[in-house]
Image (spheres, helix red, strand yellow):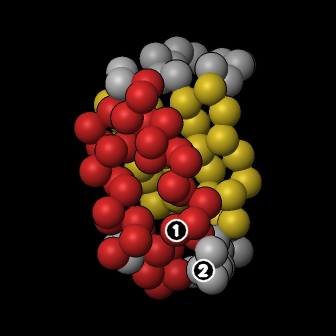
Amino acid sequence: MTVYALAQFTIHDRARYEAYAARFAATMKGRKGRLLAAQENPEVMEGKWEGTKIVLIEFPDEASLREWSESPEYRAISVDREAATEGSVLLVKGVG
């Protein structure tokens, strides 16, 4: 079943976040994930959202998502994202 990693956060340390972002694509190479969206300041159509960035990544299954998110390559750079942002990352299961 398709799953998505949905990250929604506020960036408070731009330099450290940019260091993370510069190395992000390399962690996806050879993996089954596909970056679908990454946008700062998306339009809020309903309700209220306080974040500044949203990221959506698709994986064919939960095992593939976890293989990437728990990989040594991603864990090595995720410390910069975690230090540079405040927010959450959700695992969302697809319909079907």
Is residue 96 visible from the viewing direction of this image? yes
Which structural element holds mark 1?
A: helix
Residue annotated with mark 1: 27
Q: Residue at x 55, y 48 (%)?
A: 22
Q: Do the residues labelled 2 and 1 touch (CB within 8 Å)?
A: yes
**Residue 34 % position (x, y):** 69, 66
Mark 2, residue position: 31
On screen, residue 29 versus residue 16, left or right, reads right
Instruction: Name the image quarter holding residue 35.
Output: bottom right
Say which amino acid is labelled 2.
Arg
Q: Which residue is drawn at 44% across and 81% down?
A: 67
Relative placement, left or right, of 17 versus 80 is: right
Relative height, residue 48 to residue 94 (above, below) = above
Q: What amino acid is at disc 1? A: Thr
Between 26 and 82, the residue placed more toward the observer is 26
Q: Nearer the viewer, residue 56 or 75?
A: 75
